[in-house]
Amino acid sequence: MKSNFQRRKIQQKYREEVGKKTEKDRFSILINIISLVVIVVFILNLYIDWL
């Protein structure tokens, strides 16, 4: 009984950790996309000014 309870508690902790990790990954992907868009717009602006 005790080992089963401990196992469940460990699984719950693991799930919480995985959830936090995926949230962080999603946030970093969003930041990467935003920075890529900003860089592309900046380069396009320079190119258009150069023309």
Image (cartoon, rainbow, N blue to C red):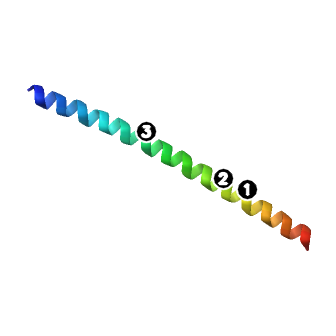
Task: Tell me the SS state at disc 1.
Answer: helix
Determine contact: label 1, label 2, CB under 8 Å: yes
Determine contact: label 2, label 3, CB under 8 Å: no
Query: Taking 14 as reference, is 46 above or below it?
Result: below
Q: Which residue is mark 2?
A: 34
Kind of residue indicated by mark 3: Lys
Which mark sits nearer the N-terminus, 1 or 3?
A: 3
Q: Residues within 10 Å of mark 2 (few under 14, many from 20)?
A: few
Q: Between marks 1 and 2, how big is the CA–CA gap?
A: 6 Å
- Answer with left or right where residue 30 lies relative to residue 6: right
Extreme-top residue of the structure: 2
Kind of residue indicated by mark 1: Val
Q: Residues within 10 Å of mark 1 (few under 14, many from 20)?
A: few
Query: Taking 5 as reference, is 34 above or below it?
Result: below
Kind of residue indicated by mark 2: Ile
x 80%, y 66%: residue: 44
Q: Which residue is mark 3?
A: 20
The image quarter containing residue 14 is top left
Q: Residues within 10 Å of mark 3 (few under 14, many from 20)?
A: few
Q: Between marks 2 and 3, how big is the CA–CA gap?
A: 21 Å
Q: Which residue is mark 1?
A: 38
Q: Between marks 1 and 3, how big is the CA–CA gap?
A: 27 Å
Task: Tell me the SS state at disc 2.
Answer: helix
Q: Quarter holding the C terminus? A: bottom right
Query: Taking 19 as reference, is 50 above or below it?
Result: below
Residue 12 percent across, percent down from the top left: 28, 34
Residue 17 percent across, percent down from the top left: 37, 38
Residue 37 percent across, percent down from the top left: 70, 58
Extreme-bottom residue of the structure: 51
Residue 34 percent across, percent down from the top left: 66, 53
Q: Quarter holding the N terminus? A: top left
The image quarter containing residue 41 is bottom right
